[in-house]
Image: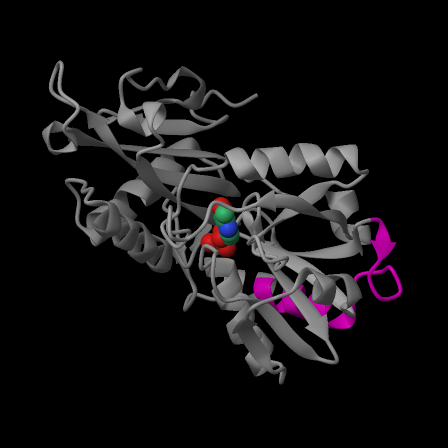
Amino acid sequence: MSDNPFADGIAYVDGEAVPVAEARLPLLDWGFLHSDATYDVAHVWQGRFFRLDDHIERFFAGMDALRLSIPYQRGELADLLCELVGRSGLRDAYVEMICTRGLPAPGSRDPRTCENRFYAFAVPFIWIADAEQQRRGLHLVISAQQRIPPGSVDPRVKNYHWLDMVQALFEAYERGGETAATVDGADNVVEGPGFNLFAVTAGRVATPARGVLEGITRRTVMELAEVQGHAVEARVLPAAEVRAADEVFVTSTAGGVMPVTRVDGERVGDGAPGPVTTALRDAYWALHADPAWTRAVDYR
Ligand SMILES: Cc1ncc(COP(=O)(O)O)c(C=O)c1O
């Protein structure tokens, strides 16, 4: 048993570190009442942050797009997150940074009167697919659920508009699946709850260009796939193409590269994780020991 009070997770609220189970936010924060917030999730693997600067860059771009701000520069935020994880002692961690609109002046509905708030937390690493699902591949359902259109909420700004995702998950469970992909209204696949999606056909690697969060794992995989000699295409990805693909996989900070071996109950390829997916997954995890891609956490 650890005597570190933060061993199960640590949160940073109102400038103070608290055990994550004790973290509270004000009920009237528009981040909660209106999903008026942006956030980012980075991870620590074997004591090292992966692509932390890229996550922070995306977080700042999201805040700019929503007219939100925090009282830290990029470098200060990186140091703060490293310190947070260091205090928790967590070697493998899921690390979330959040900026909310905050509370308006009493009686006001004017967002300009809000004081933006910053929260962060680190908890033990979270996997979208468990060990068994990663070994044999996930069973994915292409849901009828349309992802909120990019003209309403820009999916490139990481957001908490997840009602569509959660309904898609319920649909997937009812149809015998384990996770779900949402569509764009024209029967093209976009993204799922916390992940981007890829289809591999005849060695070509394709992922939706539009209507998705531009995932850091997605970007890493696109870079690795090129290095491994594949044509990589960000474009429209019809649901029919995903159903007929040789290989399908999903990507997320919460688990990296995860194979999909059934789509809508039918086998993908021969029903086992394919060679392109496996090579990309291995290359992705190999980067986690590389100082060029990672930053060591100081656990003293
Ligand atoms: C909606 C959505 N799409 C895609 C992703 C994958 O992005 P990343 O690889 O940066 O974790 C996430 C991550 O949580 C997400 O929430």
Residue reaching furthest to the right = 270
Quarter the N terminus occupies: top right
Residue drawn at point x = 52 percent, y = 23 percent: 2
Q: Position of residue 274 (x, y in %)?
A: 78, 67
Observer-nearest residue: 65 or 48? Answer: 65
Describe residue 67's horizontal placement relative to residue 41 as left or right.
left
Expressed as whole percent of the image width and height from the top left, the position of residue 243 reads 77, 61
Image side of residue 223 versus residue 104, left or right: right
Image position, residue 180 (x, y; %): 67, 45
Left-right relation of 190 to 171:
left
Looking at the rendering, the stretch of residues picked out in magenta corresponds to 265-284
Which of the 4 quarters of the picture holds residue 271?
bottom right
In the image, what residue occupies the spot 40% across and 39% down?
A: 96
Q: Is residue 210 magenta?
A: no
Name the image quarter holding residue 38: top left
* Pick the front one: 7 or 42: 42
Q: Is residue 120 above or below residue 46?
A: above
Q: Percent x, y for residue 237?
A: 61, 66
